[in-house]
């Protein structure tokens, strides 16, 4: 008995010593890691939140709360104010940093895209990390976005915008008005699906969201969750807990519907009623693609479709919403549009491109919202950015959002001022904005990774805003005080708040009396 007690005591003593050693080892490891990450890591000399230097918790928190761009912006402003007396230029968010990060040789970027995608077995063009493969796909798709091709696609844009206008004539002038976020989502997605692969969603016609639109926004937060959990590989299986069961249940159904739509487009490729982007991927005389090729086509079409939908939906919503909050801006914009055309049928892309104030409104809307406000994460090859050496393998990104909110580059940066984008000869140009860094803002990116569909997006946005404001006097319903930095959250895409407006159809006589 005594021997057994001694044995148990010895085991307990050994276990206690092992526990102490384990705790000590973990403490030493954590301390050494803290010292290394804080003072010895190749990126340790760059300023930033200390928690972000030693842990991914700061990164995770800011992304999962939808506040990452604002957090970077406020930290950048803090650093600039603290060190402005020591520096001849601001610390962060410098426009030339973007050009350094996006440097290229023969259209192949040096700073390679970082993997943040969910992964479907094929990265398409949007998430392709290999610069050579990306260039090859961009070259293949570029004819579909040429001036000639976009002119051929313009009737599709008119078809869906006209359907929107006609429907709003009936339902937009009620006491309750319409909810603009929902309707701009419908018209932009209808357009994008039709131009990508001749797919008809008919959301404006049916006045309800398609299952595709519903699941798209249900995935918005999860895409960010997936991105964050890539920083915590051991916890990665837990990410699926953030996806609602209803979405998991309907995902397979949506995938089946998408595949059926793809099969239908492949089968009908010799008898299409109008051009679309798909015919550039699979011409009418092409053989039936293999299973692997079909997966590639499905991913590419999805990316062309979603890339053609969300940025356009957000910008036509924001351009109208911001302008309604600034009656003076709206008055100038409406006057320019109505003076430019004698009839609704005269409105087309080519003359719209020369409307300075319309372009300024859209540029200012994109400056305030910034399409990719989280930055485009890139892996350094071991190179200099603005005189600072970035070691190989370190992830870098350009703080687009902080740049557009910096008073060093934009006068009154938090305010909606389309005047900052006007030519100096314009009657509404204001010299207060003459030093603004307008030449350094690229809303669709620049370099090899610039958005391939930006010319298409410009046509869609101009046509929508012009046709709507030519037809209607738009009124914001009362008791709405939206603030972008307070009411918008960014996950994979901006989560936009509801915004209610009333649309009054303008009589021809009233429109004529407003002309100069």
Image (tube, rainbow, N blue to C red):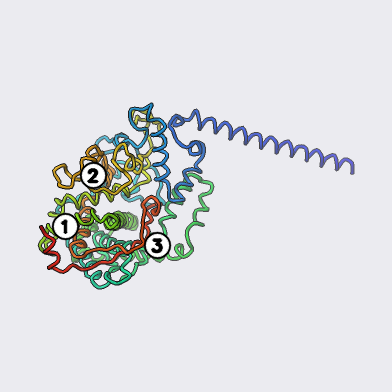
**How many C-alpha atoms fall within 10 Å of the one at disc 1: few (<14), some, or many (≥20)?**
some
Image quarter (top left, top right, bottom left or bottom right) of the C terminus? bottom left
Instruction: Tell me where residue 113 sits by quadrant.
Output: top left
- Residue at the (44%, 33%) spot, across then down: 47
The residue singled out by tag 1 in the image is 335
The residue singled out by tag 2 in the image is 420
Instruction: Tell me where residue 376 sits by quadrant.
Output: top left
Tag 3 or tag 1, which sits nearer the N-term?
3
The numbered mark at residue 215 is: 3
Q: Position of residue 218 (x, y in %)?
A: 42, 60
- Residue at the (28%, 38%) spot, across then down: 108
Cα distance in 3D space between marks 3 and 2? 38 Å
Of circles 1 and 3, the one toward us is 1
Out of 7 and 100, give the one closest to the viewer: 100
From this view, report whether residue 87 is shown above or below residue 493: above
Q: What kind of element bears circle 3? A: helix
On the question of residue 262 being in view, the answer is: no
């Amino acid at each position: 008995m005594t021997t057994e007690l001694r044995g148990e005591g010895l085991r307990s003593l050994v276990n206690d010593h092992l526990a102490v050693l384990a705790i000590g080892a973990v403490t030493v490891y954590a301390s050494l890691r803290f010292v290394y990450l804080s003072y010895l890591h190749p990126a340790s000399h760059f300023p930033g939140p200390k928690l972000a230097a030693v842990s991914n918790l700061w990164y995770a928190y800011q992304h999962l709360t939808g506040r990452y761009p604002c957090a970077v912006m406020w930290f950048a402003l803090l650093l600039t104010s603290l060190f402005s007396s020591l520096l001849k230029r601001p610390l962060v968010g410098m426009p030339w940093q973007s050009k350094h990060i996006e440097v290229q040789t023969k259209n192949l970027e040096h700073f390679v895209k970082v993997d943040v995608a969910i992964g479907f077995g094929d990265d398409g063009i949007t998430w392709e990390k290999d610069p050579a493969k990306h260039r090859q796909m961009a070259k293949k798709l570029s004819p579909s976005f040429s001036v000639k091709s976009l002119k051929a696609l313009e009737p599709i844009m008119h078809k869906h915008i006209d359907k929107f206008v006609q429907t709003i004539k009936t339902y937009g002038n009620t006491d309750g008005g319409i909810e603009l976020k929902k309707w701009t989502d419908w018209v932009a997605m209808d357009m994008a699906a039709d131009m990508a692969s001749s797919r008809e969603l008919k959301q404006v016609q049916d006045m309800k969201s398609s299952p595709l639109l519903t699941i798209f926004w249900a995935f918005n937060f999860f895409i960010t969750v997936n991105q964050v959990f890539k920083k915590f590989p051991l916890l990665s299986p837990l990410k699926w807990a953030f996806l609602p069961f209803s979405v998991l249940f309907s995902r397979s159904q949506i995938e089946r519907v998408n595949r059926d739509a793809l099969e239908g487009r492949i089968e009908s490729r010799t008898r299409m009623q109008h051009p679309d982007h798909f015919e550039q991927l699979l011409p009418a005389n092409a053989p039936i693609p293999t299973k692997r090729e079909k997966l590639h086509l499905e991913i590419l079409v999805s990316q062309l479709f979603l890339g053609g939908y969300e940025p356009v939906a957000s910008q036509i919503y924001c351009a109208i919403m911001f302008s309604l909050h600034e009656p003076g801006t709206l008055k100038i914009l409406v006057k320019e549009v109505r003076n430019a055309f004698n009839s609704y049928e005269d409105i087309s892309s080519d003359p719209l491109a020369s409307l300075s104030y319309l372009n300024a409104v859209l540029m200012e809307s994109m400056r305030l919202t910034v399409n990719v406000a989280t930055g485009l994460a890139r892996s350094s090859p071991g190179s200099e950015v603005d005189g600072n050496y970035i070691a190989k393998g370190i992830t870098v990104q350009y703080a687009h959002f902080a740049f557009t909110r910096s008073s060093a580059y934009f006068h009154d940066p938090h305010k909606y001022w389309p005047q900052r984008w006007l030519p100096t000869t314009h009657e509404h140009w204001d010299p207060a904005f003459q030093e603004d860094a307008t030449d350094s803002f690229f809303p669709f990116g620049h370099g090899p990774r610039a958005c391939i569909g930006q010319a298409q997006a410009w046509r869609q946005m101009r046509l929508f805003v012009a046709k709507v404001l030519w037809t209607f006097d738009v009124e914001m319903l009362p008791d709405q005080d939206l603030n972008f930095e307070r009411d918008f959250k960014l996950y994979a895409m901006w989560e936009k708040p509801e915004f209610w407006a009333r649309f009054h159809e303008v009589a021809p006589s009233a429109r004529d009396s407003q002309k100069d």
